[in-house]
Structure formats: structure tokens, C-alpha cells
Image (cartoon, grey):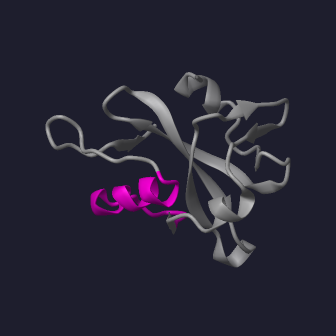
Amino acid sequence: MFEAGDIREWRGHAVVDAGGHKVGTLEAIYVDTRTDEPSFATVTVGLPTRHRLVFVPLTGATVGPEYLKVAYDKQQVKDAPSIGTDGELLAEAEEKVFAHYSLGYQLGSGGERRLARR
């Protein structure tokens, strides 16, 4: 897996799906608060006047010279839960992000949220 600092180097670069189709642009990394490991990325998608950030898991992601390749199909990523470009992922919305990709969700051991932006 990647180190959060390493992935940040790709901020602003293309995010492509497993087939090499451009999904959008890497905006930020969210870590799992239980492990402090990179867990999700936010990707800028949409029309220039209607940009939004969608969430995509980093499981199975790889990096290339000018892109981050994710293991999910472009349409699935574009249909993922999103926030505005100046928005914040609300605690009550985290479970929907995991569910969209059929991933299990549990709060931290102390009831804390699972994702934190780095």
C-alpha cells in the first residue's frame, strides 16, 4: 500500500479507472482513523461550473508517471457519494461511501469516525 505522503505527490494528476479511462483529477486523500493508512481519495469530476468531489477506495490502486489508477469502473466512481469542492464529508455520510463500493463499515473502537482528510 501507499504512504499518504507519497500519494499526495499525485494531487492534481489524472485518476483513471482499471481500463485506463480518465475519471477526474486527484484532489485529496482520506485515511482510515483506525490505522492512519490511506483509504479513500477524492476525485474532482463534473463540468467546470459544477465540479464536485467523489470518493473512491484506494484498495488495489496503483500509480503511474502522471496518474493514479483505481480498481473501480469510471461510472461507479462518478456515481459515488460526493461533496462540494469546498465541502466536508459529514460523519453520518461515511457509511454511504463504504456501502457504494460494497465495503464493510464500522465506527472506530471509541465510536469515532472512520475517515479523516490528510
In the image: residue 117, left or right of residue 71: left
The image position of residue 31, as x and y in percent, is 43, 36
Residue occupying image coordinates x 35% and y 57% = 95
Please identify the quadrant where the N terminus is shown.
Answer: top right
Q: Looking at this view, name the residue that lies furthest to the left.
A: 110
Q: Does the magenta run of residues contain 87?
A: yes
Q: Does the magenta run of residues contain 48?
A: no
The image position of residue 5, as x and y in percent, is 56, 24
First to last magenta residue range? 84-102
* Residue 19 or residue 4, whichever sits in front: 19
In the image: residue 37, left or right of residue 49: left
In the image: residue 69, left or right of residue 117: right
Quarter-of-image position of residue 93? bottom left
Quarter-of-image position of residue 41? top right
Total numbered labels placed on residues in the image? 0
Residue occupying image coordinates x 62% and y 33% = 8
* Residue 72 or residue 46, whichever sits in front: 72
Quarter-of-image position of residue 89? bottom left
Asked if 25 appears above or below 51 in the picture, the reply is: above
Residue occupying image coordinates x 53% and y 27% = 4
The image position of residue 23, as x and y in percent, is 75, 57
Residue occupying image coordinates x 85% and y 47% = 20
The image position of residue 29, as x and y in percent, is 53, 40
Asked if 116 appears above or below 7 in the picture, the reply is: below
In the image: residue 111, left or right of residue 30: left
